[in-house]
Amino acid sequence: MKEYESEITSFLREMKQRRPDLERKQREAREIWWDKALDPDEQARFEQSRVKMPGYVYQPKPKFSP
């Protein structure tokens, strides 16, 4: 009995067979946007500039009038 293979799985398998360089190009594109070395000084600045959010941001704080 043949195991089930979805249409998307067969499509992806056939596409990779037709374009053997596809995975290499995907890795190169990922390196452009995601796989970067992080600058420790820049990361520290991001942490220092972080603003604490209230527990429930959609409810305004009550205003007290003296």
Image: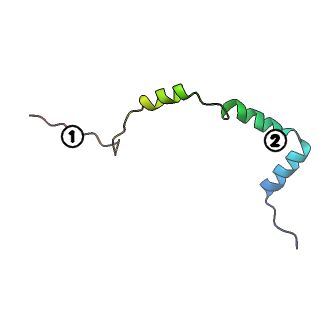
**Residue at the extreme left of the image, as rendered:** 66
Colour treatment of the image: rainbow
Q: Quadrant of residue 64?
A: top left
Q: Closest to the observer: 7 or 56?
A: 56
Identify which amino acid the numbered label 1 is placed on.
Pro
Q: Quadrant of residue 10?
A: bottom right
Q: Closest to the observer: 39 or 13?
A: 39
Identify which amino acid the numbered label 2 is placed on.
Glu
Earlier residue among tags 2 and 1: 2
Q: Position of residue 54 (x, y in %)?
A: 33, 41
Q: Is residue 26 left or right of residue 47?
A: right
The residue at the point 86 percent across, 46 percent down is 16
Q: Is residue 47 left or right of residue 12?
A: left
Q: Quadrant of residue 60?
A: top left
Q: Is residue 56 left or right of residue 43?
A: left
- Separation of residues labelled 2 and 1 (CA atoms): 55 Å
Q: Is residue 30 left or right of residue 58?
A: right
The residue at the point 80 percent across, 55 percent down is 9
Say what secondary structure mark 2 lies in.
Answer: helix
**Which quarter of the figure is the N terminus placed in?**
bottom right
Q: Position of residue 44 (x, y in %)?
A: 48, 29
The residue at the point 85 percent across, 51 percent down is 13
Q: Which residue is mark 1?
A: 62
Would you call the spot at circle 1 few (<14 residues within 10 Å), some (14-19), or many (20 or more)? few
